[in-house]
């Protein structure tokens, strides 16, 4: 409980630092216990400029898709997956978007923090895709 209070206090100091540049969300995440790092280049077919950020029960994978930046955000506590900022249950997915969503488990299995999300992400994705196809 004490660590949570200290992290909240540190976050509050970061957000209200007088006379200093406002920290980016990535800086805040890192200073409050989050981890962000490039995806290993050795993974076949994955761009070198991909990033995986993990923070508590959430992860965000950013990558290049169709010559633009795309992201997959997974919130394990809420059981939600967002693709380019939109909940995948609320929209019709294109084939290349489904392919990108299905490629994330391989990345998770090859990442120390990502492994903790592997099974839950797969289950959430399977349910979302099944519900998406029914609609």
Image: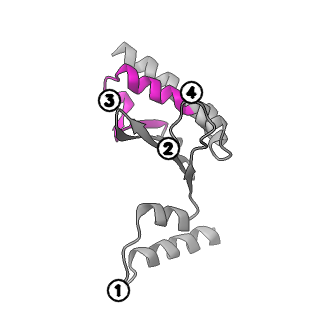
Extreme residue in the bottom direction:
19
Residue mark closest to the camera, 2 vs 1: 2
Q: Which residue is mark 3?
A: 90
User: Which callout, 2 or 1, points at the residue further toward the start of the chain?
Assistant: 1
Q: Viewed as shown, does residue 83 lie left or right of 109?
A: left
Picture quarter with the C terminus: top left
User: Which callout, 2 or 3, points at the residue further toward the start of the chain?
Assistant: 2
Which label sits on residue 123? 4
- Range of magenta residues: 79-104
Residue mark closest to the camera, 1 vs 3: 1
Residues at discs 2 and 4 in contact (Cβ within 8 Å) = no
Which label sits on residue 57? none
Q: Which residue is mark 1?
A: 19
Rendering quarter of residue 82: top left
Task: Please name the residue shown 45% across and 37% down the image.
Answer: 80
Picture coordinates of residue 78, whole percent (x, y): 48, 41
| SS at badge 1 | loop
The relative height of residue 99 versus residue 108 in the rendered view (above or below) is above
Disc 2 residue crowd, few under 14, some 14–19, many 20+, Cα 10 Å = some
Q: Viewed as shown, does residue 135 lie left or right of 31?
A: left
Q: Viewed as shown, does residue 33 lie left or right of 89?
A: right
Give me the C-alpha separation between circle 3 and circle 4: 18 Å
């Amino acid at each position: 409980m004490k660590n949570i209070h200290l992290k909240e206090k540190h976050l509050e100091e970061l957000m209200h630092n007088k006379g200093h540049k406002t920290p980016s969300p990535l800086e805040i995440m890192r200073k409050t216990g989050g981890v962000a790092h490039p995806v290993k280049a050795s993974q076949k077919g994955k761009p070198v400029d991909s990033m995986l950020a993990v923070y508590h029960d959430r992860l965000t994978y950013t990558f290049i898709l169709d010559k633009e930046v795309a992201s997959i955000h997974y919130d394990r506590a809420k059981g939600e997956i967002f693709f380019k900022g939109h909940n995948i249950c609320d929209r019709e997915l294109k084939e290349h978007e489904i392919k990108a969503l299905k490629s994330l488990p391989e990345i998770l299995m090859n990442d120390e923090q990502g492994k903790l999300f592997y099974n839950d992400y797969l289950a959430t994705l399977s349910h979302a895709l099944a519900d998406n196809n029914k609609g």
